[in-house]
Image: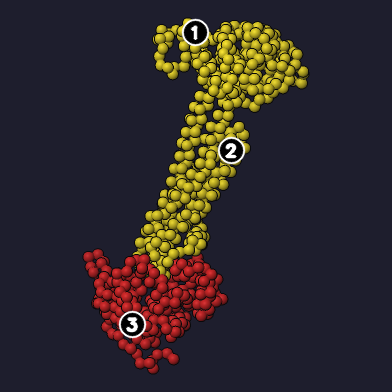
Chain colours: A yellow, B red
Amino acid sequence: MHLRNTDVTHFAWRALHGYPTRTILMLIAMAIGVAAVVVLTSLGEGARRYVVGEFASLGTNLIIVFPGRSETAGITPSTMMGETPRDLTLHDALALTRSYNVRRIAPINVGSATVSWRGRSREVVIIGSSHELLAIRHWELAQGHFLPKTDLDRATPVAVIGKKIRSELFGAHRAMGEWLRIGDRRFRVIGIMASEGRSIGVDVEDTIMIPVASAQQLFNTASLFRILVEAKTRSAIEPVKQFIIDTLQARHQGKKDVTVITQDAVLATFDRILGALTYAVGGIAAISLAVAGILIMNVMLVAVSQRTAEIGLLKALGASPRQIIVLILAEALLLSAFGASIGLVLGEAGSLIIRHAFPILPAYAPIWAVVTAFLIALLTGLLFSLLPARHAARLDPVLALSKR
Amino acid sequence: MIELKHIHRDFQVGDQTVHALNDVTLSISRGDYVSIMGPSGSGKSTLLNVIGLLDRATAGQYLLNGKDVTGLSETEQAQTRNREIGFVFQAFHLVPRLTAAENVELPLMLAGIPAEERRPRVARVLQELHLTNRSHHKPDQLSGGQRQRVAIARATVMEPNVLLADEPTGNLDQKSGREVLDTLEALNQRGITLLVVTHDAALGQRAKRQIKMVDGRIVSNSTSSPSHAPA
Ligand SMILES: Nc1ncnc2c1ncn2[C@@H]1O[C@H](COP(=O)(O)OP(=O)(O)O)[C@@H](O)[C@H]1O
Ligand SMILES: [Mg+2]
C-alpha cells in the first residue's frame, strides 16, 4: 500500500485550498523569510562588488606608497624615540623609477585652493601630479592634453580641469587656453577631463590637476601625499614592493618610515570583509526563516487538531500511520515550496528595486544565497511539520472520529 | 468469518475501570445481517470498533476470516481496514472540501490504486447508489440522506466483506433513514456481511439476527423468523 505521488500532491493541494487563511498566513511567513535572505545578501554582495570594483578601478598592478609607518610591524625604535617620520620627496619618487619592474610612477600632492576666472571663484581640490597619472588611473581626457611629460621638478603653469569646474567657472565660454588663477598663481587650461563616473578618493569632475612641482610651490611644501607605482606585471608586484621598501629605507638613513600597500592586498581584504558581511546578513535573515518554521509548526498543529476527525476518518478508511505522516508532510512541503518561490520572486524584485534606486550598487543576490534560502525553507517546513505529523499519526482513530 | 472469543475492552477513567465490553463471545458468518441494539453506553460502538480494528480488545481473541488479528501491527490493521472492512458513521464523516466522487475515491487512493482505475470504480458505486448526478457536489450541497449514501459508497468501493454501520440513521429523518437502511440491506442481499448498530427497535427488527447488549454484555442473540424480514 503506497500512496501515489500525484495523489499525495493533489490531496495536499486540496487541503491547502480548503483552509485559505492558514495557507496564506504560512505562505507570507515563508515568503518574507526567503525574500529577506535574498534582499539582504544582494545588498551585501552589491556592497562587496561596489567596493571591489572601485579598488580595481584605481589602476592595474598598483602599489601605493605613503609617508609614515602604519604599525603592523609593532613598535619600532623610531616611534619609541618620538621621531616624526621623514617626508616623501620628489627625489624619493624619482628613485623608484630605477627598477626594471616598474612601468611608471606618479607622485601626488593634494590640497585645496581658491580658483578664479574673470571674477568667478570657488574652492577646488587641487591635485599635483605628473603626466603618468592619466595612464596609471586609466582616466581619459575630453579635450586637450594632460599634464606635460617633463622633469618632475619643473613647475609648468598649466592645469587640467574637471568638467564641473569647467561649467561652473566658464559656463558657455570656451575654457581651453584660458588663464585661470589658482591661489596667487596663474595657470593656463590645457585639458578637460572626461567625466569618469566615480573613482575612489577623487571626484575627477570636481578637481583641477597641475604639475606636482607647481603644487609644491602653491602649497609651499617639499613633501608628497602619495606615490603611485605601477608594476609591469602582476607577478612583479611583490618584487617591486620589496624594491620600494629597500630603496626608501636606504634613502631615509635606514629607517622604515613609509607604508607600502598593494592594490591586490587591499582588494583581498575588502573582498574578505564584505564577503563575511554578506554571510552574516544572510545568516541573520535565515533566522527569520527559522521563525517562519516555528510559525509553521504551530499552524500545522492547529491544522491537525482542526482536522482530527478527518485524520480519524482516513485511518478508518485504511490509512497507515506512515501514510498520514506523508500526507501532512506533503502539505508542509508544498506550502514551503510555494512560499519560498514567492519569496524568491519578491526578493529578486526587491534587489531589482535596489539596483534601480542605487544604480552604483550591483545588488545581485549570490546564487549560493538563493539556493540555500530555498533549501532552508523546504527543510524548515519539513522539520517543523514532523512533530504535528507524528502527532496526527498517533491519534486514536476512535477518539478522533468522536471529536466534532 | 467474524469470531470473537471472550473479548474484553476496559477503559480507565480516573481510578475507575469501565468495562465497555465484558466477556463478549460472538460468531458471525459471511453474508449475515446483524442488528445490535441496547441502551446508550452499553458498548455497541465499542463492539463495532473492535470488530472494525479501529480499537483493540484488552483481552480475548478475534479471528477474522479464520485469521487471528488480535496481534496485528498498526499498519497491518490499517491495511485490513482498507481491504476487508467498510465503515458507515452516524455523523457521515465526509471530507467537506472534497466532492462526493473524491470522498468515495479516498480508500482507493490509500490503497495506491492508479487514478485511471479508480474513476470507473467510483462511477459505478455512485451509480448503484443513484448519486451519479451528485458526484461533483460538495457535502454541504447534499441532503443528509445523500450524504450517508455517499458514505456508503465510500465504504463499499473497495468491495469489503464486512460493512459496519454505527447508527447510520441517527442523524436522518425517518424517511431518509429508511432509504439508507434499504440501501444497506440491498448490499447485504448481494453478499456483504452487514452489522448495524441502531437505537430504533423497528429498524433493528428488520435484521435477520438481532443482538441486544447491556453493560458490555450480550444479553440476547436471536434470529428472527424469515416472515419478519422485509420482502
Ligand atoms: N475512550 C473511552 N474512554 C473512556 N470510556 C469510554 C471510551 N469509549 C467508550 N467508553 C465507555 O464505554 C462504554 C461503552 O461505550 P460505547 O461503546 O460508546 O456505548 P454505546 O455505543 O452503546 O452507546 C460507555 O460507558 C462509555 O462511557
Ligand atoms: Mg455508540
Chain of the residue under label 3: B
Chain of the residue under label 2: A
Query: Depth check: A128 or A258 in front?
Result: A258
Query: Horizontal placement of A210 versus A389: left or right?
Result: right
Please identify the quarter of the rendering in which residue A169 is found: top right
Near mark 1 (Cα within 10 A), the count class, few <14, some 14-19 or many ≥20, is few
Does mark 2 fall on the same chain as mark 1? yes
Residue under label 1: A250
Q: Name the element at disc 2.
A: helix
Q: Position of residue B26 (x, y in %)?
A: 29, 81
A136 relative to B161, above or below = above
Res. B28 mark: 3
Choose mark 3 or mark 1, whichever is in front.
1
Kind of residue indicated by mark 3: Ile
Near mark 2 (Cα within 10 A), the count class, few <14, some 14-19 or many ≥20, is many
CA separation, marks 3 and 1? 112 Å
Q: Name the element at disc 3.
A: strand
A312 relative to A226, above or below = below
Does mark 1 fall on the same chain as mark 3? no
Residue at x 48%, y 44% (from the top left corner): A372
Res. A160 mark: none
CA separation, marks 3 and 2? 75 Å
B219 relative to A98, above or below = below
Contact? badges 3 and 2 (CB < 8 Å): no
Residue at x 56%, y 9% (from the top left corner): A95
Query: Depth check: A96 or B60 in front?
Result: A96
Choose mark 1 or mark 2, whichever is in front.
1
Res. A204 visible in picture: no
Residue under label 2: A354
The answer to whether the beta carbon of the residue marked 2 is less than 8 Å from any atom of ligand 1 is no
Res. A269 visible in picture: yes
Choose mark 3 or mark 2, whichever is in front.
3
